[in-house]
Image (cartoon, rainbow, N blue to C red):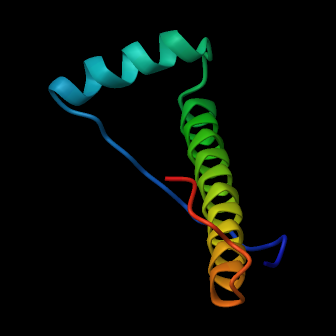
Amino acid sequence: MSPQRKIPIRIDFKGKEIRKFEVVKKHIGLKQNTEVIRALIAEKYNEIKLLEKEQRARRIREEKAMKWLEEGEYKCPM
């Protein structure tokens, strides 16, 4: 990704969205609206990366278990 690339965003909140945004902004403790958006994106990005890591680890465990099962080395504990 190029450092010069920009994604302009213009958001106008209306009605219930205003209150929701204000609650989130207060909870996060930021003053600038743009920083709230950046913080929310960073938080969601971290959640996605953690989920991907957990899914990758689970897939590796499942692949190992299947390999052991196919080779006759795995015995079900039940």
Q: Relative to the observer, which residue lies in front, 38 or 12?
A: 38
Q: What x and y, as percent, mark residue 2? A: 82, 78
Q: Is residue 30 above or below residue 12?
A: above
Residue 75 is drawn in which quadrant? bottom right
Q: Relative to the observer, which residue lies in front, 12 or 21?
A: 21
| Residue at (66% x, 44% y) in the render | 42
Relative to residue 41, is residue 1 drawn left or right?
right
| Residue at (62% x, 39% y) in the render | 43
Q: What x and y, as percent, mark residue 7? A: 59, 65
Q: Is residue 62 above or below residue 40?
A: below
Q: What x and y, as percent, mark residue 54? A: 65, 55
Q: What x and y, as percent, mark residue 73? A: 74, 77
Q: Is residue 24 above or below residue 13?
A: above
Residue 74 is drawn in which quadrant? bottom right
Number of numbered labels in the structure image: 0
Q: Quadrant of the N terminus?
A: bottom right
